[in-house]
Image (spheres, grey):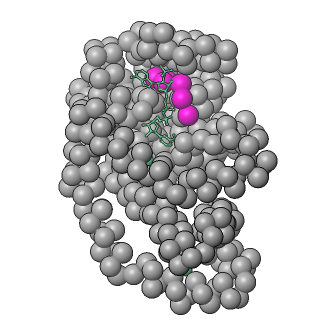
Amino acid sequence: MKVYNDSDAQPAKVKSRPVAVIGYGSQGRAHALNLKESGCEVIVGLREGSPSATKAQADGLKTMPVAEAAKAAGLVALLTPDMSHETIFASEIAPNMEAGDALLVAHGFTVLYERIKPAADIDVILVAPKGPGDLVRREYERGAGVPCLFAVHQDASGDAAAKALAYASLIGGTTAGTLETSFREETETDLFGEQAVLCGGATELVAAGFETLVDAGYAPEIAYYECLHELKLIVDLLYEGGFAKMHEFISETAIYGDLVSGPRVINDETRARMRDVLSDIRDGTFARNWIAENEAGKTEYDRMQKADLDHPIEATGRELRAMMPWLQADKNSAKKAA
Ligand code: NDP
Ligand code: MG
Ligand code: MG
């Protein structure tokens, strides 16, 4: 796969006109500050009375209502939560974009599932950093960057890909290395990863392991340590050096147990279920259900979330984590990732 670096990017493709960053959350703040320090004229677009405005102004950024920011800019980066895109785009952004302007997103959901329908004469591009906003900011500040994906959905100006690469370079993405994808690939793999592996898969695996031990008579505190707490050590090893680094740092007994028992838990049946999950993502069933859930006021979402958070592992975890002072100091540093 081709890796795009700084020398592949022409920053002027974006820098030559003001950039509107809509939303000042995890991604919005990092993008806005990096763009500004890379020499762009940045306008942060926020809704009336937004609590984010004070924060952006304190960081030295110019803020405006979304519509005015979109009007003044040549590129609009829509970095609010995905479920807010439809309304913001239709009411504030679309009427203020001109032929040849670019709309940029950091996740393809709303474009792929046609929640926003950009006019045919604007570029529609994606730049998705492969990390949470605070890392995108921190790496840029030390002269490096977080790898990004870029994609083009609609190329009206003939320059859409160049604009995406330019934007990636201005937030540090080509310093680290940027890869090309499509809106479909980015969206479907992102949803699959968080559902089957990162969020859905991992928490169900932890809960099932905890329940198995507790049901067999072991203390919940001990089960918590073995099935949840120590997961971090393993994930850190995987993150830093893949399977090989984990094998280097765990015992031979753990390696043998991994090899013989892992495939008994995650097996062909699990893979078949994963294919079901993927198929619901690809045929739009998941997106339809999630959009309908939002439109119905998220009551089922609230109910399921409450049930998840009522799991006995949560009460055990709260008690044990109170004995780990380093976690208390860290509790505000957790950042959204998926
Ligand atoms: P956040 O939830 O952090 O965004 C919050 C910001 O959006 C706030 O400034 C908030 O302003 C504003 N906002 C929320 N609702 C509205 C609204 N209805 N109208 C106007 N402004 C609104 O978003 P993320 O940074 O997590 O996600 C942004 C995009 O980036 C999404 O498309 C996401 O999928 C993608 N992404 C996120 C990653 C991450 O690490 N979080 C990683 C890669 C991609 P206010 O103060 O007014 O509430
Ligand atoms: Mg294994
Ligand atoms: Mg996601």
For residue 155, side relative to residue 161 (left or right):
left
The spot of residue 93 in percent (x, y) is 34, 19
Q: Residue furthest front?
A: 217
Question: Residue sitting at 61 percent across and 46 percent down?
Answer: 146
Query: 139 or 324: nearer the eye?
Result: 324
For residue 194, side relative to residue 59 (left or right):
left
Q: Would residue 111 be visible to someone looking at this image?
A: no
Question: Residue sitting at 60 percent across and 75 percent down?
Answer: 218
The spot of residue 331 in percent (x, y) is 68, 41
The spot of residue 309 in percent (x, y) is 48, 49
Q: Quadrant of ligand 2?
A: bottom right
Q: How many marks?
A: 0
Question: Is 23 colored magenta in this rendering?
Answer: yes
The spot of residue 76 in percent (x, y) is 42, 24
Q: Which residues are magenta?
A: 21-26
Q: Is residue 18 above or below residue 175?
A: above
Q: Residue furthest right?
A: 325
Give the image quarter of residue 77: top left
